[in-house]
Image (spheres, rainbow, N blue to C red):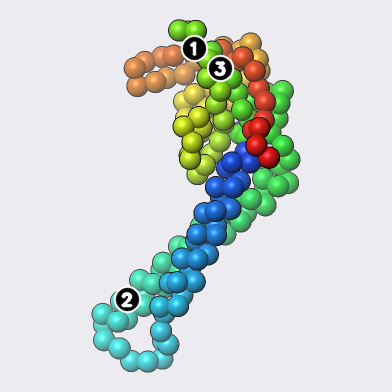
């Protein structure tokens, strides 16, 4: 894949925005428990303060990561419709004749049962493919195939 920012589905954007709001609320709560560092306390109090400070650091990092991902996705534009990419909705047909419509997303987006992450075996096989292409991928039961029937974008905006 290129270093260009990847689009995300509308559902994934909503999930990331909700996670960001939840993290901001958690950060406010944790920050409110920190005490004045000039006061003298026992070692247990100091250890608690250090733990909360580390928690704030982790929360801040995750919030920065989400904010950056949302910013990059905004500049990426919509998901491609000529080839499967992150943010695409793709219908595939399996050898048994069943067809399934799947959303190609990121691991952090794994909220719905129709999501296939771009780093999964099927997701990797689908990236860059076009309607009519047959993809080969590995499953726990062995090698598998599917045919790309159609490509679209997430229907929810």
Q: Residue at x 52, y 42 (%)?
A: 109
Q: Outermost residue, bottom direction? A: 39
Of callouts 1 and 2, the N-terminal one: 2
Lower sequence index among marks 2 and 3: 2
Say left or right for 95 vs 72. left
Cα–Cα gap, marks 1 and 2:
55 Å
Q: Earlier in the sequence, mark 3 or mark 1?
A: 3
Nearer-the-camera pick, 35 or 22: 22
Up-down relation of residue 136 to residue 68 (above or below): above
Return the x and y of residue 115 as percentages of the image width and height: 51, 32
The residue beneath circle 3 is: 92
Q: Residue 129: image x %, image y %?
A: 63, 20
Q: Is residue 61 above or below residue 109?
A: below
Q: Which residue is mark 1?
A: 98
Residue 88 appears in the rendering: yes
Residue at point 26%, 86% (across, down): 42
Depth order, front residue of 56/3:
56
Q: Which mark is drawn over residue 64?
A: none
Real-space Cα distance between discs 2 and 3?
52 Å
Residue tagged by mark 2?
A: 48
As drawn, which residue projects farthest toward the top? 96
Q: CA distance from mark 3 to mark 1?
A: 8 Å
Q: State the SS at label 1.
A: loop
| Crowd class of label 3 (few under 14; some 14 to 19; many from 20; radius 10 Å) | many
Q: Position of residue 136 (x, y in %)?
A: 50, 15
Q: Secondary structure at mark 3?
A: strand
Instruction: State how many labels appear.
Output: 3
Name the foreground residue: 97 vs 40.
97
User: Few, some or many C-alpha atoms within 10 Å of disc 1 (few <14, some 14-19, many ≥20)?
Assistant: few
What residue appears at the point 34 percent right and 17 percent down from the top-left corner?
A: 141
Residue under the point 35% across and 21% down: 140
**Quick one: which residue is furthest to the front in this view?**
156
């Amino acid at each position: 894949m290129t270093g260009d920012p990847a689009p995300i589905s509308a559902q994934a954007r909503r999930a990331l925005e909700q996670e960001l709001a939840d993290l901001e609320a958690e950060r406010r709560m944790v920050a409110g428990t920190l005490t004045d560092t000039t006061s003298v306390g026992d070692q247990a109090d100091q250890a608690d303060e250090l733990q909360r400070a580390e928690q704030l650091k982790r929360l801040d990092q995750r919030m920065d990561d989400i904010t950056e991902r949302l910013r990059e996705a905004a500049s990426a534009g919509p998901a491609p419709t000529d080839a499967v990419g992150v943010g695409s909705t793709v219908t595939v047909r399996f050898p048994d004749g069943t067809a399934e419509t799947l959303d190609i997303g990121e691991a952090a987006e794994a909220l719905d049962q129709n999501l296939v992450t771009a780093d999964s075996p099927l997701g990797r096989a689908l990236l860059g493919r076009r309607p009519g292409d047959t993809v080969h991928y590995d499953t726990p039961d062995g090698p598998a195939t599917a045919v790309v029937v159609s490509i679209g974008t997430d229907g929810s905006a």
